[in-house]
Amino acid sequence: MRHTMTHLSRTWHQASRRLLAVVCAVGISAALAVSAFSSAAQAASRIKDIAAFEGVRDNLLVGYGLVVGLNGTGDKIENMAFTQESLIAMLERLGINTRDGTLKPKNVAAVMVTAALPPFGRQGSRIDVTISALGDAKSLQGGALLVTPLVGADGEVYAVSQGQVQIGGYTASGNAASVTKGVPTSGRIPNGAIIEREVPFSLASMRSVNISLRNPDFTTAQRIASAVNAYLGMASARALDPGTVQLSVPSDKDVVQLMTAIEQLRVEPDQLARIVIDENTGTIVIGDNVRVSRVAIAQGNLTIKVTETPQVSQPSPFSQTGTTTTVDRTQIQVDEGADKKLAVVDGGVNLQELVNGLNALGIGPRDMISILQAIKAAGALQAEIEVM
């Protein structure tokens, strides 16, 4: 009996250890799955960050106006004919005739006024405007913009601007010196324009919406369509081309609510294997999908450095013989790049391995540009090189 109880106890402990091992394995697998899902979610982007709904866009506005009230820093009227004509025309509209007189004010400047009319901007709401000097004004500090109509690409007036100009710089000068900070001939007027005309666009009645990708790509467009269809539970979205996904709005869905939900869906955008090079600044940007076939790289330059350190030779003090003379001392250093080794970059390396391999050669960004271009010429770089 005692032997039977001992055997049962040993069997129970073994079964408990096996069950605990199974539970731990399941827990670790679940944790790894959650970690992988979390990493994938962090790598994905919202649709609203990589695409936009067609029709929901800004409209650019532009206008020509006058800034007055400057402290002698305006246009020189005798040199700027358009400023003079604009000033005379403005005064005539106010009932003042100045055609027979001579105008030489220094407090007026001709400016260009620009703004962006936001989507669904309603009549009576305000938008910011940017003011830029058109003539030879030195500064717009302290000036006020007079009423300026802002027109769109169709020539219609969509907003009217007026207000005190705010600039982010200044200029000060004297007879012998001057100082300038920022750009005093450009400024802004926050809420400086009132919308007078709305852009007609009926969003609620649309039954088909196009999603435009900011960076067109076949794979990304297909992923967006798949994510939208998975959310709706039906095949309502399809990719028309690399930059457009067409969405048919279901009859039981509200367009605004549907677009709000869709723009929050997460999609992992795909990207081309591309290397962007700016030779002016020596900037190199390497994409994550860049791959290199097995290749050997060596880089080195011949450097000759000549240093002249002449020394003065003179006789001993109180010596009756000898003269002071200059003795040339020349030191020549030749660097043939003997310490530059031939490095082998294995095939199919990723971005980190490629950067580590190039850094191991001890080269700078500009030499790295030449190496990348040489690798591309050798056919070992599976990426596109774009030179800015």
Image: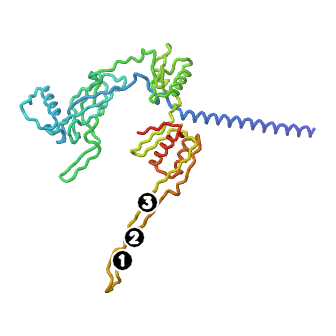
Q: Secondary structure at mark 1?
A: strand
* Callout 1–callout 3 Cβ contact below 8 Å: no
Calculate the distance from the C-alpha at mark 1 to the C-alpha at mark 3.
Answer: 28 Å
Image location of residue 387, percent across then percent down: 42, 39
Does residue 264 appear left or right of residue 34 in this picture?
Answer: left
In the picture of the structure, the residue carrying the numbered disc 2 is 329
The amino acid type of the residue labelled 3 equals Ile
At horizontal 26% and vertical 47% (from top left) the residue drawn is 180
Q: Which mark sits nearer the N-terminus, 2 or 1?
A: 1
In the picture of the structure, the residue carrying the numbered disc 3 is 304
Q: Give the quarter of the image for residue 186.
A: top left
Q: Is residue 318 visible?
A: no
Tell me the crowding category of disc 2: few under 14, some 14 to 19, or many 20 or more residues within 10 angstroms, Cα based. Answer: few
Q: Secondary structure at mark 3?
A: strand
* Callout 2–callout 1 Cβ contact below 8 Å: no
Q: Give the quarter of the image for residue 101.
A: top left
Q: Which mark sits nearer the N-terminus, 1 or 3?
A: 3
Q: Secondary structure at mark 2?
A: loop
Image location of residue 275, percent across then percent down: 48, 39
Tell me the crowding category of disc 3: few under 14, some 14 to 19, or many 20 or more residues within 10 angstroms, Cα based. Answer: few
| Residue at the left extreme of this rendering | 100
Calculate the distance from the C-alpha at mark 2 to the C-alpha at mark 1.
Answer: 12 Å
Q: Which label number is shown at residue 79? A: none
Image location of residue 60, percent across then percent down: 32, 27
Q: Which label number is shown at residue 313? A: 1
The amino acid type of the residue labelled 2 equals Arg
The amino acid type of the residue labelled 1 equals Ser
